[in-house]
Image (tube, grey):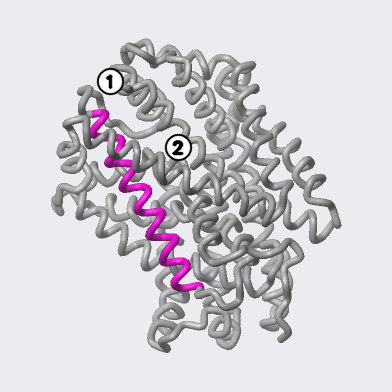
Amino acid sequence: MPRKQSIHGAWTNRWIFILAATGSAVGLGNIWKFPYIAGENGGGAFVLVYLFCILLVGIPIMMSEVLIGRRGRQSPINSMRETAYEAGHHGRWAGVGWMGALAGFFIFSFYSVVAGWVLYYIAGMGVGKFVDLGSEQAGQIFNGLLADPETLLIWHTLFVVIVMMVIAGGVNKGLERATRVLMPMLFVLLFVLLAYSISSGYFSQGWDFMFHFDPSELSWNAVLVALGHAFFTLSLGMGSIMAYGSYMGKKDSIGGTVLAIAALDTLVALVAGLAIFPIVFANQLDPGAGPGLMFITLPVAFGQMPGGQVFGFLFFLMVGFAAWTSAISLMEPGAAWLVETLGMSRVRAALLLGVVVWALGILALSSFNITADLTLLGMTAFDFLDFLTANIMLPLGGLFIAIFAGWYLTREMTEDELSLRSALIYHAWRLVIRYVSPLAVAVIFALNLYQKLA
């Protein structure tokens, strides 16, 4: 089959793709969620189980997304259709690409609201708003922000604009340029904050919280938590990695590249925990998970520490960069499809997507104030979008991608794209993607629905 070239361009080199995909994977959940669930579920024992789940679920499915994207050289919707045709199957497989692109679109609509909170806190830290605050005062500031639709709208709008500016630039002038700037800055800020945390005098407590090795705390529920996080942390099931894979060079190793992405994603999560928790413990605060840790606990901690205003500003700046790089990947599948299928320019595609997702984001942000009493299945608009994407669309997307790559793509197609040096490694990937990964994602899907609806 003649090798197609993407009309959108290509990454300059393999490491740009690794950094871009890592930026897609590294989001708000890496910074507050993973370190906490590791500390609460057996520490080092949980980390080992998580890494095992990454190997059995995350990496095989990510390899599948990349190979489909590179084979099709188009948006996830069109790549799924074209690779299905090539393998001798019906084009209805494009529906998986549609579901992924829509999932990314829906996620962005409420993710931009949370990212708007981060921008608000960057500004607040910059002007010293959180210096010498107690937990009650910090909670009042956060709750006051949620109750103020006008302020939320301003920051939500700003975030949508900065993301769409990158999307409008295309692969090389937009995505790649942003990756070259944002990802190195994110890593630098992360390690500056780690050094600051080490100097706090409570680094050993943070280390012990995350890495104490206690298998007795490793329940079956903890294993399922590790399995779920291994899937969600790598941005699987939403087409982002497939879209990025379509810009990847033919000679680049998919297996080695995906391993590097998974390693960097995990490293960022672990280092973020080691940067955050010593600061929390230094101020005798609760390392509780969720938005409260980032938007209430940490501002209090930074506000009470020497140099805390500066390092608090740097922390939220780092979180903002992580949110920005993740959000860019959420919009890329839809933008690529508009350019390919409807012949739109990048600027027009970004403008159209930006306006629609901005409007949907208004519905999400208003669920904290104006429309708080309007619910669907007992959930606000924000919670419903979160439920729909995290519990239904993403697991189904990952499940269908695993089935498609393992059972519907021909062996010749997968061998050609993966180009693994060892036949044993290829057979291991094929075995896992056919049997283990679909079963694991099906378990995630069923249990998430059960827990949410029970």
How would you rate the neighbour count of disc 2 (Cα within 10 Å): few for under 14, some for 14-19, many for 20 or more?
many
> Alpha carbon of mark 2 to alpha carbon of mark 1: how far?
19 Å
N-terminal label among 2 and 1: 1
Residue 247 position by quadrant: bottom right
Residue drawn at 45 percent across, 18 percent down: 142
Viewed as shown, does residue 405 lie left or right of 303?
right
Q: In which quadrant will I find the N terminus?
A: bottom right
**Mark 1: which amino acid?**
Pro
Q: Position of residue 429 (x, y in %)?
A: 43, 77
How would you rate the neighbour count of disc 1 (Cα within 10 Å): few for under 14, some for 14-19, many for 20 or more?
few
Viewed as shown, does residue 296 lie left or right of 322?
left
The residue pinned by badge 2 equals: 318
Q: Position of residue 344 (x, y in %)?
A: 84, 52
The residue pinned by badge 1 equals: 306
Q: Which residues are magenta?
A: 254-280
Residue drawn at 82 percent across, 60 percent down: 341
Q: CB atoms at circles 2 and 1 under 8 Å apart?
A: no
Residue drawn at 32 percent across, 15 percent down: 135
Rendered position, 109 above or below 154 = below
Viewed as shown, does residue 187 lie left or right of 209?
right
